[in-house]
Image (spheres, rainbow, N blue to C red):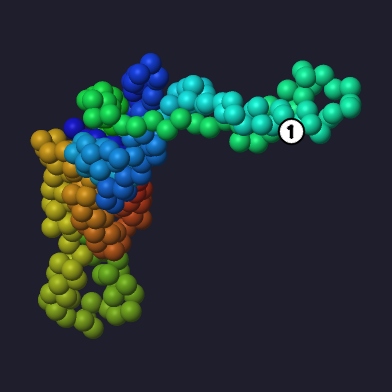
């Protein structure tokens, strides 16, 4: 089973009648990069939150936020009555002798600056079990998302791998034909330049065998098939982090495909090599998101 590095998790919790939301988003990354955006009350627990995330996510770019639900922050706003009275008194003094009602003066007063402040909330140690449980719930939701995405990635990678195997099978079928055509082409070219009495047939056979040995792709075919099998074996392994290892295997697959392409010397076989390269590139794109 594969896990994707892309995921999303969400949960909610309530403290002292106020509702908070935990959101976690992850993207692919070479290492673990955790970015926290926290309500001021939870900042003192940042290291505990980071450690909890690191124990579950392992690798990827992580954006985690813990904040009030929209509108909840308005409940923390406090009005400064002394400042309101001071503004009101000064406005009355300035408006003395003018026919301005107290209602109008009050409207002007509430437009003055610094009349409100936000009450600072202090984190109580008793809050931590609630926050921890909510974060674990969001992480479980994230893992579920990553698992679903990982299953989709694995399905596609298996399909591409099978397509490489199918193209490789076509290459094997063409290989004897390629050898025979190469032999005929070399012999035809030699006979066009010389007649049969002007060259040593035995020496020609020796040189031909040496040339065909250089063109032989039996080892490459065997290794490529082995790498394709190993790719599937690694996807089925009972370990969590597989992306890097699968990336190394895909590099080995590419090396064998390139070698076959350099030795192919046959148009139909080259077409199959192009198909294998195209499928391998799609595998590599998917592996960028595998944990």
**Vertical placement of residue 204 versus 78, above or below:** below
Q: Secondary structure at mark 1?
A: helix
Residue 83 locus on image (x, y percent) = 62, 31
Quarter placement of the N terminus: top left
Is 13 rendered above or below residue 269?
A: above
Tell me which residue sits at (23%, 39%) in the image: 48
Residue labelled with disc 1:
90
Give the position of the C terminus as an image quadrant.
Answer: top left
Residue 84 image offset from top left, x and y in percent: 64, 28
In terms of image quadrants, where is residue 58? top left
Please name the residue shown 13% across and 52% down the image: 222
Tell which residue pokes out farthest to the left in this image: 238
Q: Is residue 95 left or right of residue 13?
A: right
Between 260 and 289, the residue placed more toward the observer is 289
Rendering coords of residue 2 (x, y %)? 22, 35
Between 262 and 162, the one nearer to me in the picture: 162
Side (left or right) of 214 relative to 110: left
Position above or below: 73 against 178: above
260 to 95, vertically: above or below: below
Rate crowding at label 1 as few (under 14), some (14 to 19) or many (20 or more) other CA atoms within 10 Å. Answer: few
Residue positioned 23% across, 83% down in the render: 198
Task: Looking at the picture, tell me which residue is in the foreground, 148 or 76.
Answer: 76
Q: Tell me which corner region of the image, top left, top right, bottom left or bottom right, holds residue 186.
A: bottom left
Q: Residue visible at 14% across and 41% down?
A: 234
Of residues 92 and 42, the one drawn nearer to the viewer in this rendering = 92
Using the rendered image of the protein, determine whether residue 78 is visible from the camera's viewpoint: yes
Q: Residue furthest right?
A: 98
Residue 139, image quadrant: top left
Where residue 233 appears, as percent x and y from the top left, is: 12, 40
- Report if residue 8 is visible in the image: no
């Amino acid at each position: 089973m594969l896990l994707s590095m892309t995921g999303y998790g969400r949960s909610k919790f309530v403290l002292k009648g106020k509702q908070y939301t935990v959101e976690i988003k992850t993207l692919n990354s070479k290492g673990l990069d955790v970015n926290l955006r926290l309500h001021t009350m939870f900042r003192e627990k940042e290291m505990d939150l980071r450690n909890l995330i690191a124990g579950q996510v392992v690798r990827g770019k992580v954006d985690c936020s813990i904040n009030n639900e929209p509108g909840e922050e308005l409940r923390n706003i406090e009005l400064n009555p002394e400042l309101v009275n001071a503004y009101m008194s000064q406005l009355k003094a300035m408006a003395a002798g003018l026919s301005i009602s107290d209602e109008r003066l009050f409207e002007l007063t509430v437009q003055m600056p610094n009349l409100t402040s936000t009450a600072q909330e202090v984190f109580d140690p008793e809050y931590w079990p609630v926050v921890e449980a909510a974060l674990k719930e969001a992480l479980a939701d994230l893992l579920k998302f990553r698992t679903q995405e990982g299953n989709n990635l694995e399905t596609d990678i298996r399909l591409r791998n099978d397509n490489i195997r199918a193209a490789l099978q076509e290459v094997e079928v063409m290989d004897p034909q390629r050898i025979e055509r190469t032999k005929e082409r070399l012999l035809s070219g030699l006979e066009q330049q010389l007649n049969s009495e002007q060259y040593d047939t035995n020496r020609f056979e020796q040189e031909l065998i040496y040339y065909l040995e250089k063109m032989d792709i039996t080892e490459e075919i065997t290794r490529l098939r082995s790498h394709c099998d190993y790719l599937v074996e690694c996807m089925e392994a009972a370990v969590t982090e597989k992306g890097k290892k699968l990336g190394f295997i895909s590099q080995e697959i590419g090396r064998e495909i390139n070698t076959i392409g350099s030795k192919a010397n046959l148009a139909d076989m080259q077409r199959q090599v192009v198909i294998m390269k195209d499928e391998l590139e799609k595998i590599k794109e998917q592996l960028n998101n595998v944990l």
